[in-house]
Image (spheres, rainbow, N blue to C red):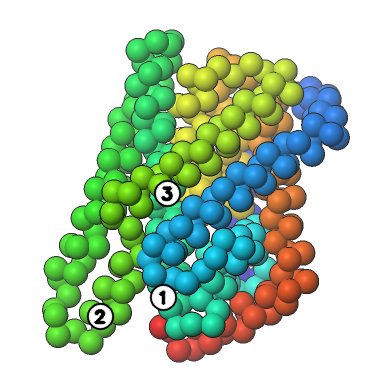
Amino acid sequence: MKVRFLIKILVSLIMLGLVLRLINFNSLKIQLLSIPLPIMIVIILWYAIGQCLSAFKWSLIARFGGIPVNYATALKAYFIGTFVNCYGLGVLGGDLARGLLIAEGHSMKAEAVTSVLADRLHGLTILALIGSFGAIISLIFADYSQRAFLIYILVGAGSLMAVGWFVGPAALLKIIPHKNKWRTKIESVLSVFPKQPSKLALISAVSVIFHLTQISLHWYIGLQLGAHITLEYLFVAIPVVNIIATLPISWNGLGVRENSYAFFLVPAVLDYSQAVALGAVWLLSVLSTSAVGGIIAFITGDFETVLRKNSTSHSNGID
């Protein structure tokens, strides 16, 4: 087991311990058991639909970058990648697994892996911009002044990532000599980042829909826990929570997500027990959906293929 994975588990346990000392465990138990199984299935399916949308957006980015991949292949690779990321199996990161799987049968491994990076950066940019919009609206129409500093964080992060999307690749090519033997390959890799307005508009629209499914799912889970989280809180807090939980410092955001819910939503719309319950239901949705990728990998034999390609990539470098 890798040291990095153990560190993530330790961080999650510490962060979870910080918030658990503030809750009423009997109240937490009652809230979790109050969600009927059919409702829990709806929540998991709701989350899974969002993942299918995210996979579709990634397939668009890959195709726009010249990678010959259809949606079915991208969807399979996406779920297998989430399984690897979620359960920490092997020595391979889920993002690399996704890239290697869609590169199967052709020599665009570097471009394929870059498409995953482009997908993540674009998603974080859209999420920050959604949060920025929510922060501005809440400052105008709602009592969210105690978190007013979020507008600066969100607008700043969204603006930096948006500018970096357009300027970053060009700036990198500026410092690479034309005679450099790697320049052609680097140009090919950087071309994966779509810049045409029509293509960006399409992937951005899909990304917005995906993030709206996640934000609305928080509202629905909160409703099942007896909390009524208003839209102004959702559109400010959830983008920030999702960005923080995405950071590779914990296992699936465990502990980090619950503390973020507590910081942004307690006591305004949640109590501490509800914040932890919200995190628990979210984690169950993630684990359940990610397990589908493991089943797919087992049936198709793709997991063994990914591990073999990972070994080759570590020996020779991704080409």
Query: How far apart, in angstroms, are the residues tagged by discs 3 and 2?
Result: 26 Å
Q: Is residue 27 above or below residue 171?
A: above
Left or right side of 122 for 171: left
Q: Left of 145 or right of it: where is 18? A: right
Q: Residues within 10 Å of mark 2 (few under 14, many from 20)?
A: few
- Element type at mark 1: helix
Q: Quadrant of the N terminus?
A: bottom right
5 relative to 46, above or below: below
Give the spatial CA distance, label 3 vs label 1: 21 Å
Nearest the camera: 199 or 10? 199
Please tell me which residue lies in front, 252 or 179. 179
Closer to the chain start, of discs 3 and 1, is: 1
Residue bearing the label numbered 3: 203
The residue identified by callout 2 is 184
Disc assigned to residue 110: 1
The residue type indicated by label 1 comes to Ala
Foreground of the two, 3 or 162: 162
Residue 107 lies, in percent from the top left, at 45, 83
Q: Is residue 21 visible?
A: no
Query: Residue sitting at 64 percent across and 16 percent down?
Result: 228
Separation (CA) of disc 2 from disc 1: 12 Å
Q: Nearer the viewer, mark 3 or mark 2?
A: 3
Of pointers 3 and 2, the one earlier in the residue sequence? 2
Asked if 154 appears above or below 248 in the picture, the reply is above
Which residue lies at the image location 45% right of the left edge and 89% below the top edge?
Answer: 316
Q: Earlier in the sequence, mark 2 or mark 1?
A: 1
Q: Are marks 3 and 2 in contact (CB under 8 Å)?
A: no
Percent x, y of residue 217: 63, 32
SS type, badge 2: helix
The disc labelled 2 sits on which kind of residue? Answer: Thr
Q: Mark 1 and mark 3 in contact (Cβ < 8 Å)?
A: no
